[in-house]
Every structure is written in C-alpha cells, then in structure tokens.
Amino acid sequence: MKFAHLSDVHLGSWREDSLRELGMQAFKESMDICIKENVGLIIISGDLFNVALPSIEVLKEAANILNKVREHDINVYVIPGSHDYSASGKTMIDVLENSGLIINVARLDENKLIMFEDKTGIKIAGWHGRKGGLEKNEYWQVGKEHLEKEQGFKIFMFHTMLEEFKPEDLGIVECMSVNNLPKGFDYYAGGHPHYVMQGDYSRGKLTYPGALFPNNFKELERFKHGGFYIVDDKMDIRWQPVKTKDVESLQADAD
C-alpha cells in the first residue's frame, strides 16, 4: 500500500533556462525515487504544470517521465491546481489523461464527487484548486457526503490553503476551514501552500509536502530544495528531499 504524495511541481516555471531545467530534473528524480521505492501509486495534489497550457517542450519532457512510471505499472492520480486549472477546460492535464499517463481525480457524476479505486485497493477522491481560492466556494456546492460512507483505505486530494493549517506569514489570506473537507478519510493530500506541514483531521492524517522545487528566489533562499512524502503500509509518513543542487545565499551590505 506504499504511495507517494507530491504537490506544486510547477513544471515550466522560472524564466531562466537553467532553473527551469532544474525543476524538470527534480520531477524526474522524484519519479525515479518512486520507482526505486516500489510505490503502489503516486498522487499529485495540484499544479503539475505552472500554467494550464505549457510549452510543447515542457509537455514532451513531462510525458516522457510519466511514461517511464507507467512502464513500471504505477498509476499517477492528479488534480488540477490554481496554476494548471482552466475554467474553459483547455488544460494539458486532460491531454496527459487521454494518453493514459495520469488520472484526473477531480470529476463529478450528477454533481457528486467520484471515488476512484486503484488496483492496490486504495480509494481516491478529490477536487481541484482555482485562482484566488475560488475553489472554497465550490466545496459547498458539490456532493461529497456519499464519500464518507465508502469503506476501505481512502485518500482525499485537495489544492487549497486551510484556515487551521495556515502559515503565520500568510495570516491575512482568507482561507477555507478544514471542516469543509469530507470526513472519514485515512489520508488528506494537500497542495497549494509551499510549506511542509502535517496534522490530523477526522480519523486521518492531513499533509502538505510543499513545492517539489523552489518556485522563486525567496523559496530558493529559504527552503534550498523541495521534496515529497512517501507513506508506507503502517501509515509512517516520510518526507523525501529532492536535492538537485546546493544553494548558497550571499548578502551584500550596500550602506
């Protein structure tokens, strides 16, 4: 039942070519680690891409990496995040899904969230993120109570900042309450804030793995590198760092 939980990969971000390539390298290394760890499945809780319509080069590299995962019979479950969600429906997430490389979990059937069951027996449901935190209003509108009645080991994926898990330096940001998430899940796979956080909700664990690779210079200086979670069959949660380069910060006194 071992699985990996990634979020905020932001493939295609950074204007600088070398840093953009390091972001892709971090994704490749994380997938190689998942294969080596023999995980049963991979979940990516939003912002696989930095934009809804990334460049052909970024899409091609991402597809090649995901195809290697597919060759090892590992399913990848994804929800669109605030960066790669598109209200028009034009997103590369759907292109990858149509190619059989990923499964988009953020689906409705008669306005009710759909529960997917992996070959490992793990059940997965989730909802997308939107720019400006607009997804928090949708949690009132979509049906999710039926998910609480499902039996078995369950994962809920979401891409939003929660009031009860909000970092101090984001205190003025308006967020959704954790109580809007469906109850009775074993693992709540969060995304959006680029902070590594863990907590408890309902009967399960709620986690944010942070960005897989720092997405700006402030994050490079503060976090140095990113990573993701690996969760085993005993529900031991391990944060796996992905370190592509050393980071050295220099300060200049301009007085």
Image (cartoon, helix red, strand yellow):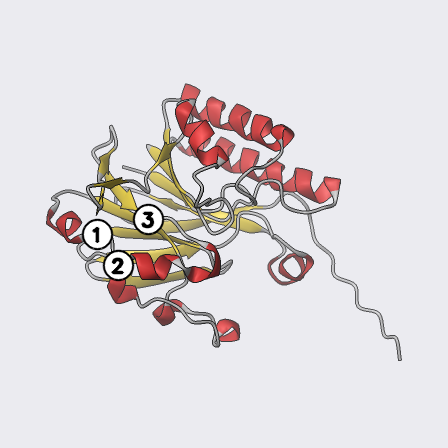
- Circles 3 and 1, Cβ within 8 Å, touching? The answer is no
Q: Which residue is mark 3?
A: 127
- Residue at the right extreme of this rendering: 255
Give the distance between the C-alpha atoms of the residues marked 3 and 1, in whole angstroms: 14 Å
Q: Name the residue rendered at 10%, 49% in the picture.
A: 149
Q: Are marks 1 and 2 in contact (CB under 8 Å)?
A: yes
**Residue on which disc 1 sits:** 185
Label 1 and label 2: CA atoms lie apart by 10 Å
Please name the residue shown 25% across and 66% down the image.
Answer: 179
- Is residue 129 placed above or below 255 in the rendered structure? above
Rendering quarter of residue 74: top left
Q: Nearer the viewer, residue 148 or 135?
A: 135
Q: Quadrant of the C terminus?
A: bottom right
Q: Secondary structure at mark 2?
A: loop
Q: Is residue 148 left or right of residue 250?
A: left
Q: Locate residue 152: give its quadrant.
A: top left
Q: For the residue marked with disc 3, what is the amino acid?
A: Trp
- Element type where label 3 sits in the image: loop
Q: Is residue 24 left or right of residue 203?
A: right
Mark 1 surroundings: few (<14), some (14-19) or many (≥20) residues within 10 A: many
Q: Position of residue 219 (x, y in %)?
A: 62, 59
Q: Quadrant of the N terminus?
A: top left
Dot 1 falls on a residue whose secondary structure is loop
The numbered disc on residue 181 is: 2
**Residue 126 visible within the image:** yes
Q: Amino acid at mark 1?
A: Phe
